[in-house]
Amino acid sequence: MSDKGPWSFFEALEESIRNWEREGVPPRWTLIEQLKKLSDLRKSLGISSVLSSPFRFITATLDDGWGLGLEIIHRACDVLGIDYTFLGLLKSPEEIAKACSNEMPDAVGVTVIQEETLDKLLYLRRLLPDRIEIFAGGSGLKEFIAPREIVVVNSVLDFILLVKNRK
């Protein structure tokens, strides 16, 4: 990654996306390192965000006691210059909805690792105002046919592309 100016960040981001599309997303620690380098480059060049308007994001897990997927999503938020609040692990739909009423985010990101938790995800959708998008990821969503009000994110690449293309 070069330090030629603001466009060097966007070029580096696009190069990473092309590599991930071609070769697949790398293993966890390699991915974390790549995301950190991109985030550091963005910050060093004084680029506040890749989005033209501010984007607020709240994250939590519904049934995941580790949150490893959200850690990657948080790193991607750092790359994109997205302000996020991590509510924590194993949060109920009510707790997430209450936080949303206080913080007024544009979107909520949650992980679902057990199929039994899908009802909680659908309940969360009913609790939130329509203007708040839900991004959901995790192994519990493999066979889930999501209603259009819930965006299923299969990888960090999906997340970056979805958010980056919001401009």
Image (tube, helix red, strand yellow):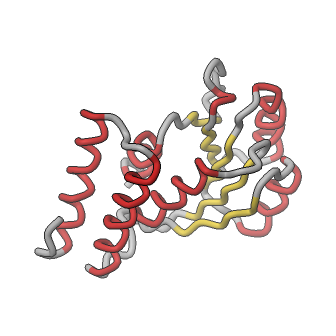
State the residue lying farthest toward the left: 4
> Is 162 left, or right, of 38 in this rendering?
right
Residue 54 lies, with reference to residue 66, above or below; the image says below
- x, y percentage for residue 145? 64, 20
Residue shown at 66% from the left, 21% from the top: 144
Question: To which quarter of the image does residue 13 belong?
Answer: bottom left
- x, y percentage for residue 165? 37, 47
> Is 97 left, or right, of 165 in this rendering?
right
Residue 93 lies, with reference to residue 126, above or below; the image says below
> Is 148 left, or right, of 45 in this rendering?
right
Residue shown at 65% from the left, 61% from the top: 105
Residue 44 lies, with reference to residue 157, above or below; the image says below
Residue shown at 60% from the left, 52% from the top: 70
Question: To which quarter of the image does residue 100 belong?
Answer: bottom right
Residue shown at 58% from the left, 36% from the top: 151
> Is 12 left, or right, of 39 in this rendering?
left
